Every structure is written in C-alpha cells, then in structure tokens.
Image (cartoon, rainbow, N blue to C red):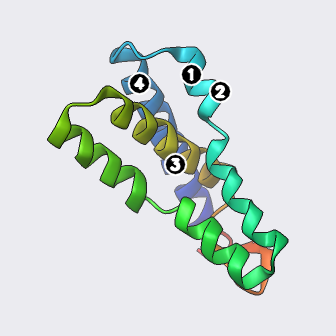
C-alpha cells in the first residue's frame, strides 16, 4: 500500500509541475521555493509535540488549496504560483516517503503506517 501512495504522489508531482510550466510561470522560482515549506520543521526546536503540529500544519493540503481558492476569487497569479509549488512540495515529500508526523517522533509518519 505504501508504494501505491508514493507512486500516486509521484504522478501528482509530475502533473503539478506540468501545470506550472503550462501556465508559463518562472521555472527558476519553482525550484527556489520548492523547499520553503520545510521551514515548518523549526517547531522541532521547541519539542516533538509542537514540532509535529507546526510541521503538519505546513504539510497538509488545506493551506495551499485555500491559496488556489483565493486565486480563483481574486485572480492574483502569485496565489496560484505559491499554491502549486506548495502542493508540489507535499507531493514530493510523500513520494520520498515523508508524511505527516506523529508527535512521539520526527521519524514516524503516516506514510509508514499505510
């Protein structure tokens, strides 16, 4: 099951990158911002519980999808750019086997338990 989830996310990453390119957004910006969501790991400097909450907040689909909805409402390209890159980051992480974190350890993720 784990492999299926990883493959699905690989396809989602490829499709999101394809959409980004088709929309003629700057490719260099995609790669510059791709790892920005990992700033949410900073919560682990406090403790595992806060770290997991902050990390999971930044690695769930809710915020990037809200940005996409904002783009549909306000037609601001930067909202869609950030949304696609953020979603791509999440897809990339899950392709690599990194998922939402459990509070007891940074190394325990929901992908491992699928």
Asked if the residues shown at circle 2 and circle 3 are in contact, with their CB atoms under 8 angstroms apart, the answer is: no
Per the image, the residue denoted by label 4 is 20
Taking 62 as reference, is 4 left or right? right
Taking 2 as reference, is 64 left or right? left
- At a point 15% along the width and 42% down the height, the residue shown is 73
Q: SS class of the residue under badge 1?
A: helix
Q: Crowding near pointer 1: few (<14 within 10 Å), some, many (20+)?
A: few
Whichever of callouts 4 and 1 sits on the residue coming sooner in the sequence is 4
Whichever of callouts 1 and 3 sits on the residue coming sooner in the sequence is 3
Which mark is in front, 1 or 3?
1
Name the image quarter holding the C terminus.
bottom right
Residue 31, how many percent across, how many down? 63, 25
Q: Crowding near pointer 2: few (<14 within 10 Å), some, many (20+)?
A: few
Asked if the residues shown at circle 2 and circle 1 are in contact, with their CB atoms under 8 angstroms apart, the answer is: yes
Name the image quarter holding the N terminus.
bottom right
Taking 68 as reference, is 12 left or right? right
Which mark is in front, 4 or 3?
4
Per the image, the residue denoted by label 2 is 32
Per the image, the residue denoted by label 1 is 29
Observer able to see residue 106: yes
- At a point 37% along the width and 12% down the height, the residue shown is 24
Mark 2–mark 4 distance (CA, rounded to whole Å): 14 Å
Per the image, the residue denoted by label 3 is 9
Mark 2–mark 3 distance (CA, rounded to whole Å): 21 Å
- At a point 61% along the width and 33% down the height, the residue shown is 33
Q: Crowding near pointer 4: few (<14 within 10 Å), some, many (20+)?
A: some
Mark 4–mark 3 distance (CA, rounded to whole Å): 16 Å
């Amino acid at each position: 099951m784990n492999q299926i989830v990883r493959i699905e996310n690989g396809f989602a990453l490829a499709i999101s990158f394809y959409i980004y390119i088709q929309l003629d957004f700057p490719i260099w910006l995609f790669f510059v911002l791709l790892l920005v969501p990992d700033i949410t790991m900073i919560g682990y400097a406090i403790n595992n519980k806060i770290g997991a909450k902050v990390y999971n907040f930044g690695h769930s689909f809710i915020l990037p999808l809200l940005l996409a909805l904002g783009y549909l409402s306000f037609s601001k390209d930067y909202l869609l750019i950030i949304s696609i890159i953020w979603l791509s980051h999440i897809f990339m992480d899950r392709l690599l086997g990194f998922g939402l974190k459990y509070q007891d350890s940074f190394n325990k993720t929901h992908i491992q338990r699928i």
